[in-house]
Image (cartoon, rainbow, N blue to C red):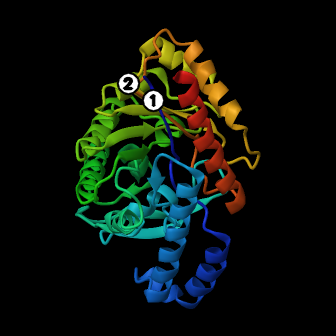
Amino acid sequence: MTEYVSTTPGLFPLPDRAKGELSDLKGHQKHDLISGDEGDEIESAYREARAEVLEVQTEAGLDRITEGQLRWDDMLAHPLAVHDAVETHGIVRYYDNNNFYREPVVTGDLEFSGDVASELESASELADDTDLQAVLPGPYSLADLATDDHYGDEAEFLEAIADFLAGEVEAFPEHETLFLLEPSLVESAPDDDLDELASEAIDTVAQATDADVVAHTYWGALEEKVYAHLLDADVDAIGLDFVSEQDQNLYNLQEYGSTDEIALGLADGQNTLVEDPEAIRDRAEWVFEKLPVTDFETVYLTTNTETFYLPYAKYQEKLEVLAEAADLAEVKAA
């Protein structure tokens, strides 16, 4: 029987109380932040905020619990923005929305950092490792958001990013699932020279963990060739954004098939309108009704994008909707 799993791509909004506190602390410690030293007070504020979002996910009934990525001010660029071999330059628009990040310029070898592993370690102390979900930018998206001023070759840079992320994953505590967020595969699709290499890069990261790996794409649908190559990667599931684009995602599934597991982005991670759990379940059924084969081992029900964009109260409601939708789907499947 198919297992329905409620989860998110992480990157949560800060709790309202923490947002004000951290804004004040960062204003007072601007110099330390530029040099990479957050200080004890900021670290403590993030610890409290992390504990809160972990508790909110648990109370909502989510099947997979993420650390929340609350420190990721640079969004998906974060693992590079805090790296010693990277300089952060000017402010860059994050894809086509109104969020921004500091441009990470790689100036040296991307050796092990451990930044994300330490965050996940803190989360693992508060969450059961059978429920814990790690979140990382996919290697293609991270390379796309960054600038290479060291490796000098696009393919070599992508490979270096993949090796770096794989090294980070190897240091992770026990986790049940790993979500690799790959919006650039949609927004800035690789050309013929890179589309196969992009899948090989995802493969490199996926092989660094024994957890189930989801390559989650969003803000549209993958081009056919990119989707076909992604199926060759050693991932357990591909995540598809059925909020932004239904027809092309459905076509890709019908034409090329799928992995044994699938992640469906069915709740809108950017819209404050809160869906009904029954509507989420019905949307999943609509997808399956259109497919010739629907015996998926696992179906992840998730928001299509990060929930970073939502007011904190709406983010909480979206979690509850996803958890209830997965429960409804399980009951009906039984």
Above/below status of 279 relative to 58: above
Query: Is residue 302 in view?
Result: yes
Amino acid type at circle 2 is: Thr
Query: Dot 2, how many residues are within 10 Å of its Cα: few (below 14), some (14-19), or many (20+)?
Result: many
Per the rendering, the mark at residue 262 is 1
Q: Nearer the viewer, residue 104 or 30?
A: 30
- Between the C-alphas of marks 2 and 1, the distance is 7 Å
Residue 275 location (% of width, % of height): 72, 40
Residue at 24 percent across and 44 percent down: it is 210
Q: Nearer the viewer, residue 56 or 265?
A: 56
Q: Is residue 11 left or right of residue 297?
A: right
Residue 56 location (% of width, % of height): 58, 60
Q: Helix or strand or loop: what does disc 1 sit on?
A: strand
Q: Nearer the viewer, residue 224 or 281?
A: 281
Name the residue furthest top: 292
The quarter holding residue 125 reads bottom left
Name the residue furthest bottom: 28
Q: Are marks 2 and 1 in contact (CB under 8 Å)?
A: yes
Amino acid type at circle 1 is: Ile
Above/below status of 27 relative to 312: below
Q: Nearer the viewer, residue 164 or 96?
A: 164
Residue under circle 2?
Answer: 259
Above/below status of 243 relative to 97: above
Per the rendering, the mark at residue 201 is none
Residue 221 location (% of width, % of height): 55, 29
Residue at 68 percent across and 62 percent down: it is 312
Above/below status of 219 relative to 332: below
* Image quadrant occupied by the N terminus: top left
